[in-house]
Image (cartoon, rainbow, N blue to C red):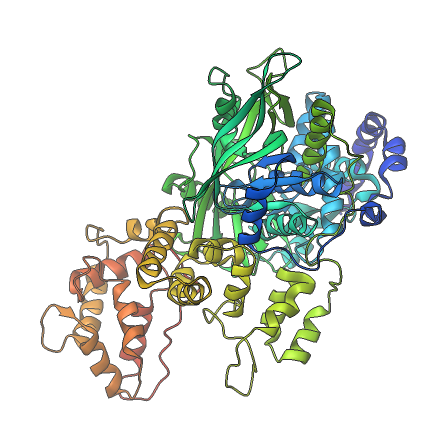
Amino acid sequence: MAFQKAVKGTALIGGGAIATVFGLSQFSQYRNKHGTLVNVQAAEAVTVPIRHDFPTREEQISILKNTPEFDVLIIGGGATGCGCALDAVTRGLKTALLERDDFSSGTSSRSTKLIHGGVRYLQKAIMKLDLEQYRMVKEALQERANLLEIAPHLSAPLPIMLPVYKWWQLPYYWVGIKLYDIVAGSQCLKSSYVLSKSRALELFPMLRKDKLVGAIVYYDGQHNDARMNLAIALTAARYGAATANYTEVLHLLKTTDPGSGKQRVCGARCRDVLTGQEFDVKAKCVINATGPFTDSVRKMDDEEVPNICQPSAGVHIVMPGYYSPDNMGLLDPATSDGRVIFFLPWEKMTIAGTTDSPTDVTSHPIPTEEDINFILNEVRNYLSVDVEVRRGDVLAAWSGIRPLVTDPNSKDTQSISRNHVVAISDSGLITIAGGKWTTYRAMAQDTIDAAIQTHGLNAGSSKTIGLRLQGAEDWSPTLYIRLVQDYGLESEVAQHLATTYGDKAFEVAKIAQVTGKRWPIVGKRLVSEFPYIEAEVIYGVKEYARTAVDMVSRRTRLAFLNVQAAEEALPRIVDIMGKELNWNEQKKKEELQAARKFLYYEMGYKVKSDQLTDSSEITLAPADIERYKKRFHMFDKDKKGFITILDVQRVLESISVQIDEKTLHDILNEVDLNKNGQVELIEFLQLMSAIQKGHVSGSRLAVLMKTAEENLGQRVVIPVDRSGGGL
């Protein structure tokens, strides 16, 4: 009864506010103008022919070297840069794009994975009567609908729950979420709705029960960000854009305008990072789309220009999938320090974040323990006391740099712009900065419009609304069934391939290796608990992957899902890539080292060693110490004070269990803190103490020793796969 009264009160209170914003939004005009957005087939308006396949990287480099002059040269291979390339090339402009690292290697692969308008921005727009923020939300909601339409294999609507713990908050949040629906207009994914306490707990059983009043559910989009970025790049390449990763801009080229006598940017001096070769790329217009590195390129044009980028670091963590329902996210609208935290299912795991703190611009941002613990504490506030939120369940962690900018065109140059900014220098360099992932297409359209106007390029209007991306053309939700039936792939693997490559999944299936088993017939997994297969590494090389890091983090998403699984897959990935790219043994060794360094620092592996070190404090009770000593001495029969692979093998043989030596070496190495090839008693006690405190989980040695102790004298199956535990 109380809940029903609250809902009725919510409707009454919200009516006036909705009517007010309804007028502000000019909803009728918005719907008339944009209501048929997702039905637009822009591809029909594109006159530029599209290739069946994209050129090789070597062919792209040759085009860059041998083309006398491009219309547009874009620096930066993130979402915005690749969006600019696709927008320009589909207008018929001769287009080039250079990226010094890999496509999506920076901010574009380290997002919250949401395609959203921004509920919090709408709240600020209403509370502060901020028209700029309102327009930004409105544009983002329009772009959200377009992105879900043009890449349905990589994106999907996601319901997000906003739990309510005070009665007065129910009408307040309901009004805000309904306004979000209204501003979206005909592009509203699904209408938001209110849930009773019991229904909220039914849909999100991990939720904290005490004081819960009810919940509100609204819809936004979710995507595979790195793969989406790559799809944009590959689509641009198929339309004829000369795109090249690992091609660094050394400096800008300039020429003197004969009419005005001014210096004008006319291209860039480049270096192929993989070969060291340098060459010039000439262009009528140069676009700077380098995200956090915006100012470094602007200073290539003018050393005296003031910085406009104000970088902010956002940390995310990944936890096991059992922390959230399969298809329901959670929004914490007001954290302890006023931030917003999302808690979302993603790729069968759970992603939580983000933080927001000032940072320096770097190519290698590192997640901090402080930020990880902040997120964990916020998660604890919303989950049931029955769910133990353990530090050891963090499977991966990363930091992304959000390139907030001040508008150089504004009188108030100190004020941070929440929208994107297009700036044109005196020499004609066009800079696109700010904005958000969701609005990449609109940012690209504005940028190319500015390029055409400033440089007098001969091109029509943008044709990217409704333009399907790589893999979307013949994709359907049931495509994976054909993969299972035609090729004999596991259902989980087939679903993964379909949602990663779209209609190009058949190309991956065709090169999948025969397993030699009754089932699956083809498709050897890189690691047992994830659906990534070896054929994806071969196909990834075709998709311009040139390092092991490219493969483990952006062609597959292993590094973002489970950093230990990623490390386990690395040797095989390097072997396959080495064969495809003709690497010698030294190169393969270097790739392994570089990838392990990436996992250690940038993907949160370092925190594992920080949680369990040779100086870790042992806080076990005396009875627990005696129990664990007894377990240890069961393996250390000779009372040496340490155990080796031979000791473990001897105990396993006595219970008729066989585990290969390499696996045993890996298991012991996880606990061998001083890396001397053996596990001392003190190291074992440090491990058990860290497990008891929740700092470490999923230790294979701990599980193996406990199982052996419990089943000594019997034949048992000892699990040696990683559990849901993490860093």
Quarter the C terminus occupies: bottom left
Give the quarter of the image for residue 460.
top right
Question: Foreground: 324 or 165?
Answer: 324
Residue 518 lies, in percent from the top left, at: 55, 88
Residue 662 lies, in percent from the top left, at: 29, 74
Q: Who's the residue at 81% across and 40% down the image?
A: 8
Question: Foreground: 184 or 445?
Answer: 445
Position of 65 relative to 470 (above/below): above
Q: Who's the residue at 70% across and 24% down the image?
A: 455
Q: Count of labels shown?
A: 0
Residue 296 is at least partly visible in this image: yes
Position of 585 relative to 159 (above/below): below
Residue 422 lies, in percent from the top left, at: 65, 25
Residue 557 lies, in percent from the top left, at: 51, 57
Tell me: 298 left or right of 441: left
Residue 211 is at least partly visible in this image: no
